[in-house]
Amino acid sequence: MVPIIDFANIIIRIAPSVKTNLRIAHNRTPPTKFVQKSMKLALYTSVTVSAVIFFLLARTVSIVKLIPIMLLVAATSYALMFIFILQSPKAEIRKRQREIDREVLFAGRYLLIKLESGTPLVNTIEDASKGFGISAKYFKEIIDDIDTGMPLEKALEDARSFNASKKFKRILWQLVTVLKTGSEVTDVLRATLRSIATEQILEIKRYSKKLNSLMLFYMVLGSVVPSLGLTMLIIMSGFLNLQLENTLLFSLLFLLTVIQLAFLIMVRAARPLVDI
């Protein structure tokens, strides 16, 4: 077990982004255990893939040629799976980023209103953590750090450093700067929120332009090509005395379904999650 632990620590030293990604994703698994678990899962996957390939090729390939093939398959599958698992926290980071970006403007405006009313910064963040919406849980994480004895400035700095949203980082950075310099926060925060709102409007405009291209792509591949293609196929089959099998028609139907799903996925992925 000791060599595995040492090897895990070596990987963490070589790729410090693993520890950072776990922190940003708020994955409580210690980095060393995460790497060990990744190594084990990659090993299980490698053995499974190698066994399947072995039984598929055992009857057609000689043992002399099969051994190097199996070694290559095992090493490749292990490396790919290990890298894939190490990168898995990025999926949670992207999820957190989309969640925060969806409500970052409303969360910032809530902070601005509370601060303008004279509420202290700590109480403002605490009230935000008790509110509704997804952003409340991210403010709750800051309050939890403060409750453990961490200074407010350090808690905000950590929340900024290990936050998935660049927009939310800018708001937290203004709060950290105010604590360090003692300057007025409302004017700076108001300007930051105005800048974020402008960026979100530009994102919506860019999405509208991208959506026009996607609609053109959909009209060509989802409507024009299938209808004209099927019509031409029927006409050509009549001239050439070809019989259209049900398998071909069902295959075309399946292809159209895949195109429809691909279009929906592209539209959903391109849509900006903004609320103004």
Image (spheres, rainbow, N blue to C red):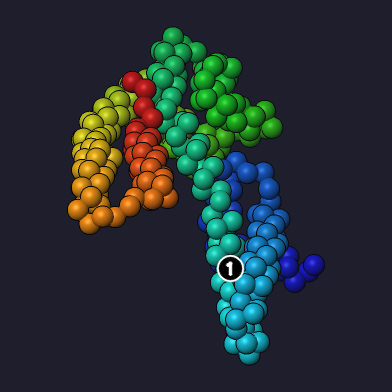
Q: Position of residue 62 (x, y in %)?
A: 62, 87
Residue 184: tell me if it is visible.
Answer: no
User: Would you name the residue on which mark 1 appears?
Assistant: 77
- Image coordinates for residue 121, horizontal then vertical, percent: 51, 21
Instruction: Looking at this view, name the residue that lies furthest to the bottom.
Output: 64
* Residue found at the very far front of the displayed protein: 241
- Mark 1 surroundings: few (<14), some (14-19) or many (≥20) residues within 10 A: many
Up-down relation of residue 276 to residue 74 (above or below): above
Residue with the most extreme top position: 117
Residue at (69, 32) in percent of width and height: 148
Q: In the figure, residue 5 lies in which quadrant?
A: bottom right
Give coordinates of residue 99: x percent, y percent. Answer: 48, 31
The residue nearer to you, when weighing 105 against 39, is 39
* Residue name at image x 55 percent, y 29 percent: 138
Give amino acid for label 1.
Ser
Q: Is residue 276 left or right of residue 209?
A: right
Classify the position of the N terminus by image quarter.
bottom right
